[in-house]
Amino acid sequence: MTNDFFHQYAGGWIYRLVNILLDEHLADFDWNSLDSTGVAPLHLATYFRLDYLVTRLLKDAHVDHNLFTRKTLPLPSSQTALHLAATQDNYNITRLLLQHGADPLRLDHHGRTPCQIAAVQSFDDLVSLYSAREQDGATACLPLSPSGPQFAPAEPAGVPVPVIDWLQFGSVQDAVVGVASQAVSGWRRPVQERAPLGGACPIPRVDARNLTLEVFERDFLSTGRPVFITNVIKNWPVKELWRRTELAEDHSLKEFMVGNIPYGFIFGENHGMAPLFKYLQSIDQAVKEPAEEPMYIFDSKILHNKKFFNLAEEAPFPAVIFQGLRPKHWYPQFFLGPINSGAPFQVHCPAVNGVVFGDKRWLLYPPAKAFFSKKHTHPWYNEAEKIIQEAAKTGSPVVFPETDAGIPLECTQREGDLIYLPPFWGHAILNLAESIGLAIEFDIGDC
């Protein structure tokens, strides 16, 4: 049996097959061997959050729990399994590794302990787990030295973009009716922005002019940390092309995939194709008659139409993202939706999302707490508000129907912001204003 054969299944979800391999080939395999990409089975099992497989490798195969990776992506280079667990806020696997003797003082190639990586992302339970260790807790969680490796600082969120009143339509005869009296972009904002649920936002904001490849790899790729990147989108040509008037006049008859959630056809949800002018009319009508689950354009095929869009020329994403991720393939997607439209909780490969016009609220869970849902974000948010209010009255913990992970992290993506989201971060999106922009999902291999 070749090393790569086992590694293929160690990184998958085939529990029974992995157990058979462990049972029947325990003595035939070097469990500490690195495959052709530079990772061992324990690294893969940790990265894919396979608690049971980690337990078996530690107890039955007696693997070296301090072994370092030797590859860059998707698993960072020169990191132990403890480092990988720290990037994902994985309490259970961290506890398992520490119980079996993993060394919390091992440094990655940037000179950081696992606890320091957890601390910079505010993974408080994980930091407490390390800090409680009498023998090395204080040392493992020392603050990073100013003269040592640094994480990019967070910029202040800044003053929110000014809001304007909803434009009231007497009738909707044309997709561009009344645009002149709205904001410069033609896309509406609410009078008052919806209040957050109360979750913190530890995601830093970094000016694209300061985001070198070294900084991107050190502070974000190797730590699995999201980041908002500023001063990118303001220079995109689509800032002119995707104003409502221009978009409606140039592409009114083009058809887009529309659904109550992105790619709703996969989940048996409401979906279909609609010409742009019809969709814009529905947005206008929703001003007077708000929908519980507003319809959302989330379409990848339209971007294959060069008459509609040219990614390289009209929306050039920062080169460091492609240089750092080195994707095998990437999948750009166009989005457009009214207030309270959005995407339900999901998990996928690394991605970037840029808001050309509008604002988005991101609800985030670290990989170890991520989950899938097909419930529209608007009713989910409404229900979450009620649960939080009731918990405040009774003093009981906040427990949502689909997760026991508590209140999600909450971050607001303002017009012109680009967000990089690492692999496996759970996320949902609620559009706070009429929002239009681009997302790209990257295929980087073992993701």
Image: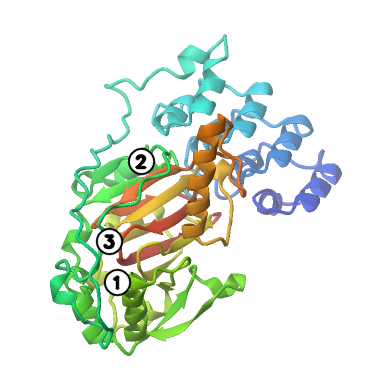
Q: Which residue is mark 2?
A: 203
Disc nearer the start of the sequence (3/1): 1
Disc nearer the start of the sequence (2/1): 2
Q: Going by the image, does 290 lie left or right of 381?
A: left
In the image, what residue occupies the spot 23% across and 57% down? 416
Q: Going by the image, does 431 lie left or right of 176?
A: right
Please state, as top left, top right, bottom left or bottom right, where the C terminus lies in the image: bottom right
Classify mark 1: helix, strand or loop.
Answer: helix
Q: Which mark is residue 311?
A: 1
Task: Tell me the amino acid under the disc marked 2.
Answer: Ile
Disc nearer the start of the sequence (2/3): 2
Q: Going by the image, does 131 lie left or right of 31?
A: left
Marks 3 and 1, how far apart in space? 20 Å
Q: Residue furthest top?
A: 134
Is there CB contact under 8 Å for labels 3 and 1?
no
Q: Position of residue 300 (x, y in %)?
A: 42, 74
Classify mark 2: helix, strand or loop.
Answer: loop
In the image, what residue occupies the spot 30% across and 61% down? 433
Q: Position of residue 148 (x, y in %)?
A: 31, 24
Q: Residue furthest right?
A: 24
Task: Tell me the amino acid under the disc marked 3.
Answer: Gly
Q: Which residue is mark 3?
A: 358
Q: Position of residue 178 (x, y in %)?
A: 18, 78
- Closer to us: mark 2 or mark 1? 2
In the image, what residue occupies the spot 41% across and 39% down? 198
